[in-house]
Each structure stands twice: as C-alpha cells, then as structure tokens.
C-alpha cells in the first residue's frame, strides 16, 4: 500500500478511519459541544441567587455553602480523569457519559427532599459537569488543527461569559417567580438536546484507539489529594481559622497524598498523568499561564460585584450588569486572538500586550478604588477583560499543539484541573484579604462585614484585592515569556487561504501518521 494512502491529507482515507470533517460539519459539532459546555458552566452560577430560598425551604442555612462546594469538589477532581478516559475509550462515549451523569444528577437535585439529599445530588451532578468543558476543548482539538483552532476558542469564552452573567439572573428569576427546583429541571431538556446533538455528529470525530490501561490507583490518589486541598481552601477563613489544627491537618493530608501520587507516577507502567506530558515545558508554562488568567477572571467575577455594592453603592442588579464590560471584553478579545493565530507568527506578543494592559488597569483600580467615576471603572474592567481574553486561546492551543494526539485528552483535562485549583486558591486568598482588611474573624460572612464597614475601610481592603490580581497576572506574563513559541501544526497558509469554505479541516497527525506527515508542508513542529 502506498504511503500516501496513509496520509490524512490525501483524498483516500484509510479503511475504517473517519474522514476529516468539513467546516459545516465542524459547526454542527461545535454547536453540540457549546450546549454541553453551557450546562456545566451554568450550574456553577445559577444556584447562587437561589441559595437563600433553598435554605429556607429545607430549614437549613448552615449547610448552604455545600450546595456549591459539593459540585466544585467533584467537578474539579474528575476533570483529568475524563481526559484520560477520552484518550483510552474515545471522545464520543466519554462525552455522552458525562452529559448523562450530569442529567441524572440534575434530576436528583430537582427531586431532593432534604438538604443532605440535595448536597449528594450536587456532588453527582459535578461528576458529570466536570468533564464537559475539558472534553469539549479536546474534541475541538481533534477536528481542527492548532493553526486553525484558535478561531473556535471564542465559542468557549462566549459560553463561560454567558453562564457567568446569565446564570445568577436566570436563577433569581426562576426562584422568585416560579420555584427554585426549576434551576435543575431546566437541565433535563437542555441535557437531552445536548445528547441528541452530539450523539450523531461525534461519530465523525477522528479517534485512534490505543491499547492502554487506566491507572486507577494514580487517579484515586490525585482526586483525593485535590479534594483535601479544595476542602482546606473552602473551609479556611470561614469554618476554621487559616492558622488552625483543622486547616493544618487537611493541608498535611493533601501533601501526603500528592507525595504518594508523585511516587505512583514514577513507578506505574502507564501513569495517570504521563511524565512526558508533565515534563513538556510548553504544556507546563501554557497551563500555568492559562491558570493565572482563569483564576483572576473567577476571582473578579466573585468579588467585583461586592466591590460595586459596598464601595460604589450600586444595587445588586446594577452590580450584575456592571460585570458585562469585563465578560464581554474577555469574549471579544478571546475571539480576536483566536482568529489572529491563523495569521500571526509571533503569537506570544498578543497575550503579553494584553496582560500588560490588564495589569496597568488593575493598578489604576488599586490606586483609586473609590475615586474613579463608574464609567472609568467599567472602562478599566473592559481593559482587564481584553487582557484575560488574549491569554485563553493562546495557552490552550499552544498546550495542545505540543502533545501527541493520544495525549490530547489528558493534557487538556490536566490544564483545566490546574485552572480550577488556581481559581480556588485565588478566591480563598482574596477572601482572606477582604476579611483581614475589614478586621473580621474566621467564620464571619464577608458580605455582612462589608455592608457594615465604612467607605474608606472598604476601599482600603479592595485596594489589596486588585493588587493581588495584578500580581497573579504578572506571574501569568512570566509564564507566557518562558513558553517556547513553536510553529502551530496545520495546513500551509496558502492552501488554507485558497481553500473553499467546504474544504476539510486538517487534524493533528497521530503518532502513527507522524513520519509521513513530516514530509508535508505545514505539518508543523511536534
């Protein structure tokens, strides 16, 4: 058989191998994935405005935080596991399983008869929701080459922005005018639609099965270590003092489990996180840069509304609307940067310029937290969003560009896992900054202290919140600088520009196809 027969770029694909998807087919896949991503992202925010009503319904206000925490704990812990399962068993079956678990968890939430049952159901829901975002990014990487992939990253940013702003609004409306259980019932038709849309189109997604085993012990150690660390970050400063035996015990347990996980990685024949992925400098720096940007975005979406309400004296609804410049700029510049990746060779300059602008904007907010007019604050938030948006497509595409296809799922899952951990760490740090700045004690609700404090005290506390975010973005810029600027794999530029709209996209060559692919122009550097 001629070598060209094995070439994915030839017109005659190998027997049994999925043909490259055309652009209209890619759009169908993207729409199905967006609905799945929206389900996972929405349920992290939609419950926020319904929590007081749920607490009164069950007569239990003390355990309300667990409705959010249970989802985040399980969702964060299983993210890299989904990536590994997708590499071993295929994207379609893993994505459908994640959506199915999420729908079952949503049904259990809607039917919960007690607070304990609702918390358990939320944990089950998180087991499904944790894989939706990472699997969607992995599937996009399967159907579009790195050179072309950035243009689709704007869809992911749009889903995240819509869920962040629309989730609390929708949750409040359904809770106030209908019933709080509707925030979970609504997931059933959406989830079934996502199952129907993805079940057929994902059959065409290229997948190269490999005989690999799943390191269950390594997966269990990593998830247990993450849960212990997340519990410490969640309870620290709220249920327990940061300097306490309880937080120290959780941190020690997490450290021991991480140590055992590292030991397992060094000895397993097929480790849960391959050392080739962890040791890849591009994967490491790109994942850390994306984690810094995501942590800043999550931290600001949580604490900026409190800043609006307590320092600038806006209403709750006005505070939600005031987040639109931040989220909109993130989506717009994520889309612009993603599309520019097709044409720009020195692509690191885009996130570096964006991060510089975002750091300067955060510095301005730190210097004048209560002296700027509302229009000036909104403009600065738009600058911050533009900087954050420029990081996400570059970090994701460069990370996926640096690994082999059979490691795409686990690398993407691990990157999303570290983004979630970084977000939890920064949110905890910002909470401690605000609590300390207001002179509160552990266990005291921050919102209560903020609304009782004077304007100058509040401004002083939020000054350090913005400085902390600027510091995190400075670390993100350092990681971007350290990241190697490799050529993106994909079709030659002239062929991409000359192709008709229905021309097939060019996926990354698999490990078996790599020798033949190296002889083709535009194959890129592995």
Image (tube, rainbow, N blue to C red):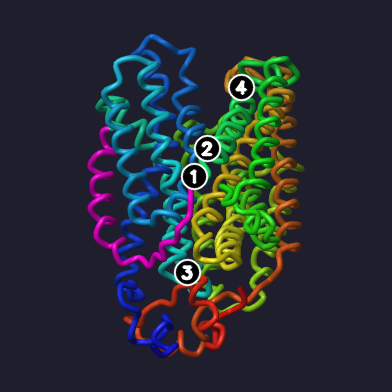
Q: Earlier in the sequence, mark 1 or mark 4?
A: 1
Spot occupied by residue 111 in the image (x, y as percentages of width and height): 26, 23
Q: Quadrant of residue 277?
A: bottom right
Label 3 CA crowd tier, 10 Å (few <14, some 14–19, many 20+):
many
Which residue in the structure is indicated by mark 1? 81
Label 2 CA crowd tier, 10 Å (few <14, some 14–19, many 20+):
many
Q: Are the two marked residues, 1 and 4, in contact with CB atoms closer than 8 angstroms?
A: no
| Label 1 element class | helix
Considering the image in quadrants, where does the N terminus appear?
bottom left
- The alpha-carbon separation of the residues under discs 2 and 4 comes to 17 Å
Which residue in the structure is indicated by mark 4? 235
Nearer the observer, disc 1 or disc 2? 1
Q: Quadrant of residue 174?
A: top left
> Which segment did they paint magenta?
185-213
Which residue in the structure is indicated by mark 2? 77
Residue 258 visible to the viewer: yes
Nearer the observer, disc 2 or disc 4? 2
Q: Are the two marked residues, 1 and 3, in contact with CB atoms closer than 8 angstroms?
A: no
Residue 76 visible to the viewer: no
Q: Are the two marked residues, 1 and 2, in contact with CB atoms closer than 8 angstroms?
A: yes
Which residue in the structure is indicated by mark 3? 151
Q: Earlier in the sequence, mark 2 or mark 4?
A: 2
| Label 2 element class | helix
Q: Is residue 14 above or below residue 143?
A: below
| Label 4 element class | helix
């Amino acid at each position: 058989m001629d070598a060209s027969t094995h070439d994915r770029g030839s017109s005659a694909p190998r027997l049994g191998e999925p043909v490259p998807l055309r652009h209209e087919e890619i759009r169908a896949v993207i729409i199905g994935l967006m609905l799945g991503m929206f389900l996972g992202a929405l349920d992290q925010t939609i419950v926020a405005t319904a929590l007081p009503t749920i607490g009164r319904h069950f007569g239990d206000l003390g355990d309300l935080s667990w409705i959010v925490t249970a989802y985040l704990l399980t969702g964060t812990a299983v993210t890299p596991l989904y990536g590994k399962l997708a590499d071993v068993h295929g994207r379609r079956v893993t994505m459908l399983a994640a959506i199915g678990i999420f729908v079952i968890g949503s049904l259990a939430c809607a039917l919960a008869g007690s607070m304990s049952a609702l918390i358990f159901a939320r944990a089950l829901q998180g087991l499904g929701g944790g894989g939706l975002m990472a699997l969607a990014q992995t599937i996009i990487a399967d159907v579009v080459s790195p050179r072309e992939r950035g243009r689709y990253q704007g869809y992911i940013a749009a889903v995240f922005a819509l869920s962040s702003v629309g989730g609390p609004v929708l949750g409040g409306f359904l809770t106030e005018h209908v019933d709080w259980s509707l925030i979970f019932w609504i997931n059933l038709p959406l989830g079934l639609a996502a199952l129907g849309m993805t079940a057929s189109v994902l059959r065409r997604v290229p997948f190269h099965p490999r005989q690999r085993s799943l390191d269950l012990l390594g997966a269990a150690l990593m998830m247990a270590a993450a849960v212990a660390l997340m519990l410490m970050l969640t309870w620290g400063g709220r249920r327990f003092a940061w300097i306490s035996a309880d937080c120290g015990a959780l941190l020690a347990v997490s450290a021991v489990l991480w140590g055992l996980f590292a030991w397992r990685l060094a000895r397993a024949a097929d480790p849960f996180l391959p050392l080739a992925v962890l040791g890849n400098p591009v994967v490491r720096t790109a994942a850390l840069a994306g984690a810094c940007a995501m942590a800043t975005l999550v931290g600001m979406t949580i604490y900026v509304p409190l800043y609006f309400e307590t320092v600038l004296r806006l209403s709750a609804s006005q505070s939600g609307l005031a987040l639109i410049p931040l989220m909109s700029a993130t989506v717009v510049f994520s889309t612009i940067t993603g599309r520019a990746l097709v044409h720009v060779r020195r692509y690191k300059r885009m996130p570096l310029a964006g991060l510089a602008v975002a750091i300067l904007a955060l510095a301005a907010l730190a210097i004048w937290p209560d002296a700027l007019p509302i229009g000036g604050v909104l403009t600065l938030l738009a600058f911050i969003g533009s900087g954050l948006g420029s990081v996400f497509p570059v970090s994701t595409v460069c990370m996926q560009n640096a690994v082999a296809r059979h490691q795409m799922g686990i690398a993407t899952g691990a990157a999303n896992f570290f983004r979630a951990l970084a977000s939890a760490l920064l949110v905890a740090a910002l909470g401690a900054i605000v609590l300390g700045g207001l002179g509160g004690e552990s266990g005291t609700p921050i919102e209560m202290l903020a609304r009782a404090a004077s304007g100058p005290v509040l401004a002083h506390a939020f000054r350090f919140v913005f400085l902390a975010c600027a510091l995190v973005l400075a670390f993100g810029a350092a990681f971007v600088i350290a990241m190697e600027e490799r050529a993106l794999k994909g079709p030659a530029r002239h062929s991409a520009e000359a192709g008709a709209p229905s021309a097939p996209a060019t996926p990354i060559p698999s490990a078996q196809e790599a020798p033949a692919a190296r002889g083709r122009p535009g194959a890129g550097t592995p």
